[in-house]
Image (spheres, rainbow, N blue to C red):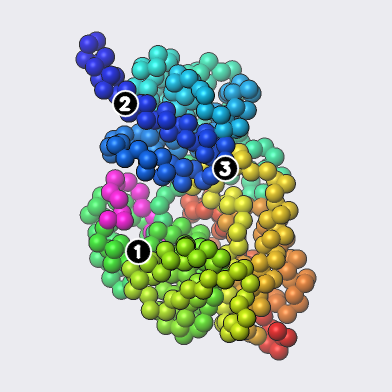
Amino acid sequence: MKREALRLDRFRTQAESVLDALRSLIRGVFGVRRPADRVLAEFLRTHRGCGSRDRAAISAVFYAVARYYGALRAMLPEPVAARIERGETDFSPEELAALGVTALIFEGEHGELAASLGKLYALPAVPELPADAPFERRAAAAACFTGSEKPVAPEALLPAAFAAAVPQDFSQLTRLMARRPPLWIRLQGKDVETTLRELAEAGLTVRRHPRVAAAAALTGGKINIFTLPSFRAGGFEVQDLASQCVGLVCAPKAGERWFDACAGGGGKTLELAELMRRRGTVIAGDIREGILHELKLRARRAGFPNISTLHHDGRVPRGFHPCDGVLVDAPCSGSGVWRRNPGSAWKFDLSELEAYSARQFDILSRFSAAVKPGGVLVYATCSLFREENERVVERFLAAHPDFTPESGTHPLTGEIVSGIYHFDGFDDDCDFLFAARLRRRFGAAR
């Protein structure tokens, strides 16, 4: 008994850090609508005294609450949920601990961490469950722990209003939201076998994709992959499978000139340059000059000679030479990557889709002017919603008859599609992305 009390006393500092992180989650994700990964990264930066065990515990509880907030919300009294969604953080340690332990039960990680939190804050006993228990059984255990009589179905993991707005099966979609996504990388360079061997020696399980040769999913292991020599030598980039498929839809050829108009961090820019066998030119453009600096560093690390950057104001610069291909990876709701940024769905209002769609149409129209006659225009989003995907393309084609959809092979299924691509996480455990490949007619007026 004395030994247990001593152990809990030593655990207290870690537990207090976990609860502080939950306050940051409520304030940052629900209060001011910041992505969960950025909120957590900032918290860990400002709490440098946390050791590796502390950081692991903080991350586990933080993401469990964010990922299963919909299920937690279904159990919480409405006034409590309203306080969380207003970003209020004046909860007692016992209330926060109960929120964290319940989330860990839903996550299936209700071992020593959940038990210690429960004992430290005098919560009910944490029920034992097998690690592979289905959602319904975890939900029943969470209800037993909290004393809730409200049944929780997987559909609770996303706002019910989204059911009619997404083309995917809503029940299947919500079940996928309850699973952690794997970490996908894109292998690049000439020494792929050395990279794969180093990843395996680091304790990681590497699963190569059967159709996308450069893609591999990493699971297991506890190593920081960014410290590996193969990463520092440019042997791989972290890039989701669906994102890699957008580059395959672009299908640039060696020696061509491509413009990644909304390049952001540059993951697709690097892929385009690699697909071109590092010959030709890829111009990475963005309205944010700082993020282009980060892209330059990534390109230099991986030794790409065919990437340049262009800071623009959201328009094609005067005198810009038309390109063989233009990728418009437009700003969007980010709903297709909510699984990687859990909690975001609960601060998204469907009324925002109209503004997103209008902005996307405007961006696509502006940068279509950079496509030379006979060239390719690819429009992409990481969105689940038709308004940001098919309907933007339909509106664009109606206003720009010099462009037409171009059929091609779907990178994940091998099926022939008529220029419209959906990359769904159901079969390949990836993000949800959309892409449309359009061809500009020869002789079209510029």
Q: Is residue 55 left or right of residue 435?
A: left
Nearer to the camera, 49 or 145: 49
Disc 1 is placed on an element classified as: strand
Three-letter code for the amino acid on which mark 3 is drawn: Arg
Residue 128: x and y in percent read 39, 22
Q: Residue at x 24, y 10 (%)?
A: 1
Name the amino acid, label 2: Thr
Residue 226 x/y as whole percent: 31, 56
Label 2 – label 3 distance at C-alpha: 28 Å
Q: CA distance from mark 1 to mark 2?
A: 38 Å
Which residue corresponds to mark 1?
236
Q: Nearer the viewer, residue 190 or 278?
A: 278
Total marks placed: 3
Quadrant (top left/top right/bottom left/bottom right) for the C terminus: bottom right
Magenta-drawn stretch contains 345: no
Q: What residue lies at 59% left-to-right and 23% top-to-bottom?
A: 80
Residue where numbered disc 2 is placed = 13
- Badge 2 crowding class, 10 Å Cα cut-off, few under 14, some 14 to 19, many 20 or more, is few
Check contact, mark 1 vs mark 2: CB within 8 A.
Answer: no
Residue lying at the far right of the rendered structure: 398
Q: Position of residue 227 (x, y in %)?
A: 27, 56
Question: Mark 1 belongs to which amino acid?
Answer: Phe
Disc 3 on helix, strand or loop?
loop
Q: Nearer the viewer, mark 1 or mark 2?
A: 2
Q: Is residue 216 magenta?
A: yes
The kind of secondary structure element at disc 2 is helix
Q: Is residue 111 visible?
A: no
- Report the residue marked by disc 3: 33
